[in-house]
Amino acid sequence: MRRRFLLLLGLIVFLAPAFAQEGEDWNAFRERTGQYYHYLLQRDVDNFSFELTSKAYIDFIAQYGDSTHYYPLKFIWTSPEDRYYVLQTLPAAAEKDSLRREMLLRIQDLKNLWEDILFDFKKYIFQPPMYSIPDGALARMASDTVGISYKDPQGNFRLRENYAKSGLLREVVWEAGNQRTITHPVYKLDENKWYCVGWQSQKTVNGEVTEGLVYGLEPLWIGNHYLPNQVDVAVQAQRGDTGEIVSGLYRIFLRDLRFNELIEVRNPGPIHPRLQR
């Protein structure tokens, strides 16, 4: 018997803030329903930034510095889609070369962890989910759902997205060869707009489940802007060589959200190769 496993997922669906319009096409649907989401990249936002850390990094750095050194990276997003990382001040103990190398390696691990979820964060937090869909995508306007499908420019993978007629995103399916990832975002309502509180993904290869992930977000409101201040990632995966099921839990913290800072990008000097953009 083939070994299978499933990370149990609980879905939360909330009523729509508005009714669908008869006879609208995809462009009209996207324009109408995009306003039903809370998101960061409003029209008056040229850039935003926040500081990043993880539970693993805090556990490591606490023995060398105080809480002022707990957030080692500043993440900057500028329109349309440029991103930068600024290394924050390290504790005095970093003057020792061997310890500095260890700190930089730990910071690189943090950056990698963040990059792993950045694509989803952009889709569910930075902007309404339908805004990431390229022009020319195929749309199927059914009586109660809207289906969208498109390929990446290189044709390496296909994405299919399923929306309720209200505009609520229900499912995203990523496919490449024999691999498939199905994601269900979870939304709540605030002031008749949806905001994302997590998403749940299941990866398969040749129809066999190989990995399940659950992302939980702790909501934080800063004025009218929503940005989670904590991201919990629960992973359950099957080792390819042994078939053993392994589990993991990761936690990322975000703080100090800022908008429209004066940013000047200069040609940087030599930096640690593991911390390049």
Image: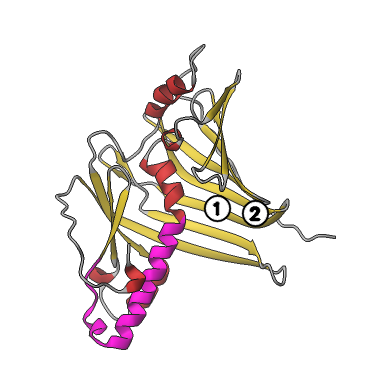
Q: Is residue 108 magenta?
A: yes
Tag 2 secondary structure: loop
Q: Which residue is mark 2?
A: 7
Task: Work out whether 81 lies above or below 2.
Answer: above
Q: Which residues lie in the magenta part?
A: 87-116
Residue drawn at 55 percent across, 38 percent down:
12
Location of the N terminus (image quadrant): bottom right
Above or below for 259 versus 224: below
Q: CA distance from mark 2 to mark 1?
A: 8 Å
Residue 192 visible somewhere in the drawing: no
The reply, left or right, for residue 78 in relation to residue 215 is left
Q: Residue at x 50, y 52 (%)?
A: 215
**Amino acid type, callout 2:** Leu
157 left or right, relative to 37: right
Q: Nearer the viewer, residue 218 or 83?
A: 83
Residue at 38% x, 46% y: name it.
Answer: 219
